[in-house]
Amino acid sequence: MLETVGLTKEFRGFAAVTDVDLRVRAGTIHALIGPNGAGKTTCFNLLTKFLQPTRGRIRFKGRDITGCNPAEVARLGLVRSFQISAVFANLSALENVRLALQRARGGSFDFWRSEDVLHVYDGQARALLEDVGLGGFADTPAVNLSYGRKRALEIATTLALDPQMMLLDEPTAGMTHEDVDRVVALIRRVRQGRTILMVEHNLSVVEGLCDTITVLTRGRVLAEGDYATVSANPEVVAAYLGRADA
C-alpha cells in the first residue's frame, strides 16, 4: 500500500531521517516506534507531504507521490491525524464530522448558503459518531469533550474522508487508562478494509494492535518485525533503555 525507498530529510546538514525503506502491507496495522528524537514524526510529515524529502521516493498504491502536496495525497486516500487533537472547539461533534463530509460538495465552502443544505450529511455524520462511540455526544461542543473523546472525534472526521490508509500520530498520547482502552477498541473497529500506520509510544498498545513494527533510532531503521521479534532484539532494548556497559 505504501512504500519508501531511501527516504532522507536533512535540515541544514542535520539528518533527521536517513535512507528509510518502509513497506506497509495493505490491510495491516503497522507501527513506527523509537525513542524521542528518532525521526518518527518527521517520517509522518514526509509521507503526508508536509515536508519534502531531501532525497528518496514515496509510493502509494504503486503511484509515486514524492512531488505531491498534502491535499493531493489526502484526495488519493492517504489521510492523517496529528499529535495535538485538531478539532473545531466551538462546533458540536456532529458539525465537526459534517464539515469533513462536505468535501463531497466540491470546492465550495457554502459561506453564502443556508445551513439547511448541509443537513443532508447529518445521518452519515451521526453514523460515524456511533462508529467511534460518540453517538450520545452529537450535540456536545468539542471543547466540552474529554481528551480521549476529542481523539475519537478526530478519528471520526478522518473516517469521513473515506481513507484507504490512515496515519495516526500518537493516538493515545496523554490519555488515562480508560481512554487508552477506548481508543484501542476504536482502532480495532475501524481497521476493517483499511490500512493503518501509527506512531505510538505506548508499547502495550503496539503489542496488542500491530501486525508489523518498524523501530527507528537516530533517523534510521534499527529493526522490523512483529512485537515478539523486535522486543527481543538487543539493539532495540539498548535504544530504549541504554546499554548496560554505557
Image: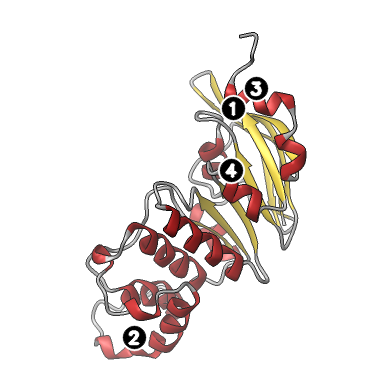
Q: Is residue 199 visible?
A: yes
Reading the image, the residue beneath label 2 is 118
For this orientation, the residue located farthest to the top is 245
Q: Which residue is mark 4?
A: 203
Secondary element type, mark 4? helix
The three-letter amino acid code for the residue at tag 4 is: Leu
Circles 2 and 4, Cβ within 8 Å, touching? The answer is no
Report the residue at 65% width, 48% height from top: 207
Q: Nearer the viewer, residue 223 or 206?
A: 206
Local packing at callout 3 (Cα closer than 10 Å; few below 14, some 14-19, many 20+) is few
Label 1 close to label 3 by CB (< 8 Å): yes
Three-letter amino acid code at the position of disc 2: Leu
Residue at coordinates 44% horizontally, 51% vertically from top-left?
82
Q: CA distance from mark 1 to mark 3?
A: 5 Å
Distance in Å between CA atoms under marks 1 and 4? 11 Å
In the rendered image, the vertical position of residue 122 relative to residue 39, given as above or below: below
Residue contact at pointers 2 and 1, CB within 8 angstroms: no
Upstream in the sequence, badge 4 or badge 3? 4
Q: For numbered disc 1, what is the local secondary structure?
A: helix
Horizontal and vertical percent position of residue 186: 53, 66
Q: CA distance from mark 2 to mark 4?
A: 41 Å
Q: Is residue 246 above or below residue 136?
A: above
Locate the C terminus and report the quarter of the image it occupies. Answer: top right
